[in-house]
Image (cartoon, coloured by chain):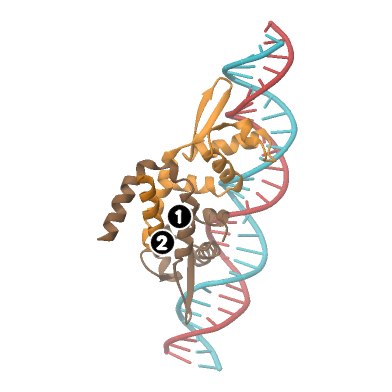
Chain colours: A brown, B orange, C red, D cyan
Amino acid sequence: MNETEFFKALADPTRRAVFERLAGGEMNATDLRQGFDLSQPAMSQHLAVLRTAGLIAEQKHGRNVLYRINPDGVAKIHRWLSRYNAFWPSRVDDLKQLLKEMDQ
Amino acid sequence: MNETEFFKALADPTRRAVFERLAGGEMNATDLRQGFDLSQPAMSQHLAVLRTAGLIAEQKHGRNVLYRINPDGVAKIHRWLSRYNAFWPSRVDDLKQLLKEMDQ
DNA sequence: AAATCATATAAGCCTGTGCTTATGTATTTA
DNA sequence: TAAATACATAAGCACAGGCTTATATGATTT
């Protein structure tokens, strides 16, 4: 799970859409294809890229495979981004507000 | 400046290295090449990709061009990432600490 | 004005990526 | 046990991406 792999994984619009859908809850590959004009192997390949990048995790359930977001992947992007904290000062107030809301 | 462009821009190790170097301070293309085994056009092309993605900004100074990080680009990644706040709860405490430090 | 310097652009090459169809492999159902 | 289901893997194709060399452009120096 290196940085190049996860940025490459997120550089594809279809994969970002899959990732966003998984943020709403775990799902198997067949259900994920709903709304995408994409063959079954294409989806399978996208999921493999996201999994290799450490962005999603999988769990076998009989002949189905449930996919879900891997929090470690998200944390890793955040850690990378935090090196550049100094460059988004205008966002700090928004973030303070967000944390305040999360406390309630 | 769309999401695909900036994730693609950061998906290349050389471009991430350039971006990180610029985080230390603005610099022109010739100075940026120091330490990279890269032709002048290759660096120029990388800078164009970063600029198109909105990650860096340029400013002409005579026959030199100074490059620097564009805070809007960093803010944009942060905004994208903030959709997945729910997935890095362990980071929230670190962030609170950071904001506390910034207030001092 | 001519030479030099900093950078950009053009064209071509090779590799990587995303797609497809075809096929393989478990697992479940009839 | 045979058929169907859910998914992965393989092979091949078309296009995108990163590199190179060659050349253009504009600013500076001599």
Assess whether mark 2 and mark 1 are in contact (beta carbons under 8 angstroms). Answer: yes
Amino acid marked by disc 1: His
Amino acid marked by disc 2: Trp
Q: Position of residue A41 (x, y in %)?
A: 53, 66
Q: Position of residue C15 (x, y in %)?
A: 68, 52
> Mark 1 belongs to which subunit?
A
Q: Nearer the viewer, residue D1 or A53?
A: A53
* Relative to C27, residue A71 above or below: above
Q: Is residue A103 left or right of residue B70?
A: left
* Relative to B35, residue A44 above or below: below
Residue holding disc 1: A78
Q: Nearer the viewer, residue B7 or A27?
A: B7
Please tell me which residue is depicted at 33% across the width and 50% down the height of the picture: A95
Please tell me which residue is depicted at 44% across the width and 42% down the height of the picture: A86
Do the residues at discs 1 and 2 belong to one chain?
no
Q: Which mark is residue B20?
A: none
